[in-house]
Amino acid sequence: MLDPLIPTIFHEHWWLDAATKGRAEISEVTEGGRTVGRLPYLKETRLGLHSINMPTLTHFLGPGINDGSGSEPNRFVKRQAITRELIRKLPQFSSFRQKLHHNVRDVLAFQAEDFEVTAQFTFEVGPAPLEVMWKAMRDKTRNVIRRAEERYGVSNIMDPQAFFRFSIANLRAKGEEPNIDFVTCIDVVTRALDRGRGHFYVAVDDKGDVRAAIFCVWDARSYYYMLSTRTADSGNGAIPLLIWSAIKNAASMGLVFDFDGVANAGSILLYSGFGGTVSPRYIVMKSNTLYQTLRRIRRINPRVSNHFL
């Protein structure tokens, strides 16, 4: 059963503990001796600037609120009041940025506290019979999956360290260097697997070599597409094959498959092929004048600003 105070896997204590190396804090609101609002956050300080941002691999956060029963207008007013109190209980910061989870239906309370608001969109595929989901996909997507099925088997067996070594090798083969904390990533992924809350999907060729892999996690409502990597010669069907395998598993669990955000035109083309619906995820931001000034400097001279941000 979904706990409104812990609305996603990313709000759970073990996840936050791993993703922040034990540095997560929580703003809380109580009413009549019980907690009615929680807002987890990670505060980091560099040269006197306090920033609150998203922890490693933590794709959604935002307030978890128990707005009780009663009419929707009354619950709306209560949600607004709890959210504004959670914001006001945050420590002083130079900048704040969080991407909010699917239960946050509006950001009026953040706007009332002078936060800027943007939106990122994601595709969601709701659970349905396999034939219904298969038919809802684009012909081209079905075709690339069929061709990939002829080349690859799909396994769920992979070691977290092996996954990230594979990912680093694929990046370097493209002339790129990783820019993520892999030690923390390995800890988060390992804990998810240990709790039975994560799955690898691995495309293996007829020689037994790994050609592509993805990683997904889930909570009581959603099944999140988190990580993916593939070799340059794996073909354009390896990742769609693995995504389709994950979607089928999510449907068998009665969960919504969440593509976890659309980053570019390529991901729009790929994700839309699976026939999902588009859903917004709000991003809330606020920063003071000094931080904004340093951000402008960064655009002009990255070397200077890297000492500050």
Image (cartoon, rainbow, N blue to C red):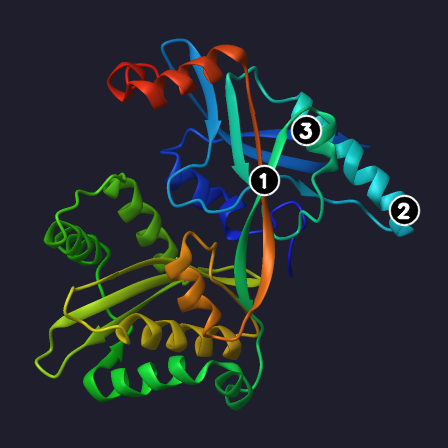
- Quadrant location of the N terminus in the rendered image: bottom right
Residue 39, position as x, y percentages in the image? 61, 35
Residue 139, position as x, y percentages in the image? 43, 85
Callout 1: SS: strand
Tell me, for residue 86, which label it has, or none.
3
Position of residue 29 relative to residue 130, above or below, is above
Q: Is residue 260 left or right of residue 129?
A: left
The kind of residue tagged 3 is Leu
Q: Residue at x 51, y 88 (%)?
A: 135
Density class for disc 1 (Cα within 10 Å; few <14, some 14-19, many ≥20) is few
CA separation in Å, label 2 and label 1 = 25 Å
Q: Is residue 281 left or right of residue 207?
A: right
Q: Residue at x 46, y 55 (%)?
A: 262
Density class for disc 2 (Cα within 10 Å; few <14, some 14-19, many ≥20) is few
Residue 27, position as x, y percentages in the image? 61, 28
- Tags 1 and 3 touching, CB below 8 Å: no
Q: Residue furthest left?
A: 207
* Disc nearer the start of the sequence (2/3): 2
Tell me, for residue 131, which label it has, or none.
none
Position of residue 82 relative to residue 15, above or below, is above
* Disc nearer the start of the sequence (1/3): 3
In terms of depth relative to the viewer, which is nearer, 10 or 292? 292
In terms of depth relative to the viewer, which is nearer, 49 or 16? 49
- Residue 114 at least partly seen: yes
Choose top left, top right, bottom left or bottom right for residue 61.
Answer: top right
The kind of residue tagged 2 is Pro
* Disc nearer the start of the sequence (2/1): 2
Tell me, for residue 73, which label it has, or none.
2
- Tags 2 and 3 touching, CB below 8 Å: no
Q: Residue at x 17, y 70 (%)?
A: 211
Residue behind mark 1: 118
